[in-house]
Amino acid sequence: MKLEDTKSLVTGAASGIGRCIALELASAGATVVGGDVDMEGLKSLELEAKELPGKIYVLQLDVANESNVKEFIFAACEKIGYPNTLINNAGILRDGLLVTQDEDGWLRKLPTAQWKRVIDVNLTGAFFMAREFAAVAIEQNVSPALIVNISSVTRSGNPGQSNYSASKAGLDADTRTWALELAPFGFRVAGVAPGLTNTPILSRVSPTALADMTGSIPLKRIAEPYEIWQAVRFIIECDYFTASVIDVDGGARF
Ligand code: NAD
């Protein structure tokens, strides 16, 4: 698909990687609807995109809220017509060990709400978006169509991230599942698994842990959002690429 032919929905578009993807798409002449829980961030995105050849519309979106996802897709269709591309990018971290014990022997268990919130946003949110997007595209004969899921290098497991790693491993499984299920309708579904990337999400990681992790990356630096966009752009442009996930991690495997 040519970048300028995409009518894209980008989740988590107010910040970081999603914001970069939305701006790069609009720079290439594409039409984008950016969704996020952060309305202030969305408004500044809309402003930043004003002079670009394409267009970015912004709409409030909580991907973990099923009815809000339906409203978002409906409102997006009213703004740009039927979209042909979905970038499932919204994601959160709420790190914590499964069980820890302090010096006095007190056990602290990973709270259920902390487990659930990450699964709800990163995995169930992507499912809600993909399902509604695919239903509209199939009903309206939108073909070709594309879903890109933003995964993570930590999908194979990382201490303190059982919720996050599980959400991303599940997302990768669904990348392949949806690719196989939707191929007969002219869909491609693929993923990008970034390593540590320079975005506000990293403010949730302690500076010491960040320095340790950066030191273990063979390229000895974290990625910039543009480098994650480069893989997304490849997926959009390569019409034979589906059912796989591209690692963009400087060689790191946690
Ligand atoms: P970020 O925090 O800068 O951006 C995430 C965006 O998602 C924010 O704007 C946030 O408001 C939005 N969001 C959060 N919950 C939402 C919800 N319920 N509904 C809609 N939007 C919501 O982080 P980022 O680094 O740009 O992360 C983007 C994606 O990349 C995430 O899926 C993340 O897991 C993944 N990722 C990031 C890194 C990294 O090191 N930055 C590494 C691997 C994977």
Image: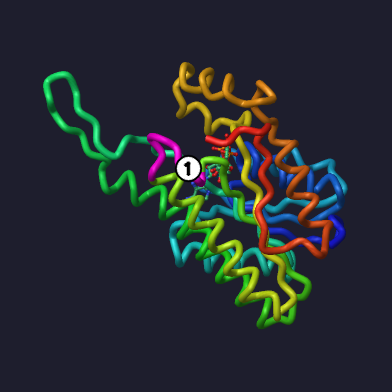
| Front position in the image: 155 or 23 | 155
Tell me, yes or no, whether the highlighted magenta stretch contains residue 163.
Answer: no
- Give the image location of residue 10, x and y in percent: 65, 53
Q: Amino acid at mark 1?
A: Ile
- Looking at mark 1, is its residue's CB closer than 8 Å to ligand 1? yes
Tell me, yes or no, whether the highlighted magenta stretch contains residue 159.
Answer: yes
Using the image, determine if residue 229 lies above or below residue 132. Answer: above
- Give the image location of residue 226, x and y in percent: 74, 36
- Give the image location of residue 122, x and y in percent: 48, 51
Magenta stretch, main secondary structure class: loop
| Front position in the image: 143 or 227 | 227
Using the image, determine if residue 173 lies above or below residue 133. Answer: above
Q: Residue at x 86, y 52 (%)?
A: 29
Q: Quadrant of residue 230?
A: top right
Q: Would residue 199 appear left or right of 101 to someone viewing this image? A: right
| Front position in the image: 186 or 49 | 186
Q: Would residue 248 appear left or right of 31 to someone viewing this image? A: left
**SS of the residue under disc 1:** loop
Q: Residue at x 79, y 50 (%)?
A: 233
Using the image, determine if residue 213 lies above or below residue 63. Answer: above
Name the quarter where the N terminus is drawn: bottom right
| Quadrant of the image where one finds ligand 1 | top right
Classed neighbour count for the residue bearing mark 1: other residues with Cα under 10 Å, few (<14), some (14–19), many (≥20): some
Q: Quadrant of residue 44?
A: top right
Q: Residue at x 26, y 43 (%)?
A: 111
Q: Which residue is mark 1?
A: 92
**Bounds of the magenta span?**
155-162
Q: Would residue 20 appear left or right of 160 to someone viewing this image? A: right
- Give the image location of residue 128, x and y in percent: 50, 65
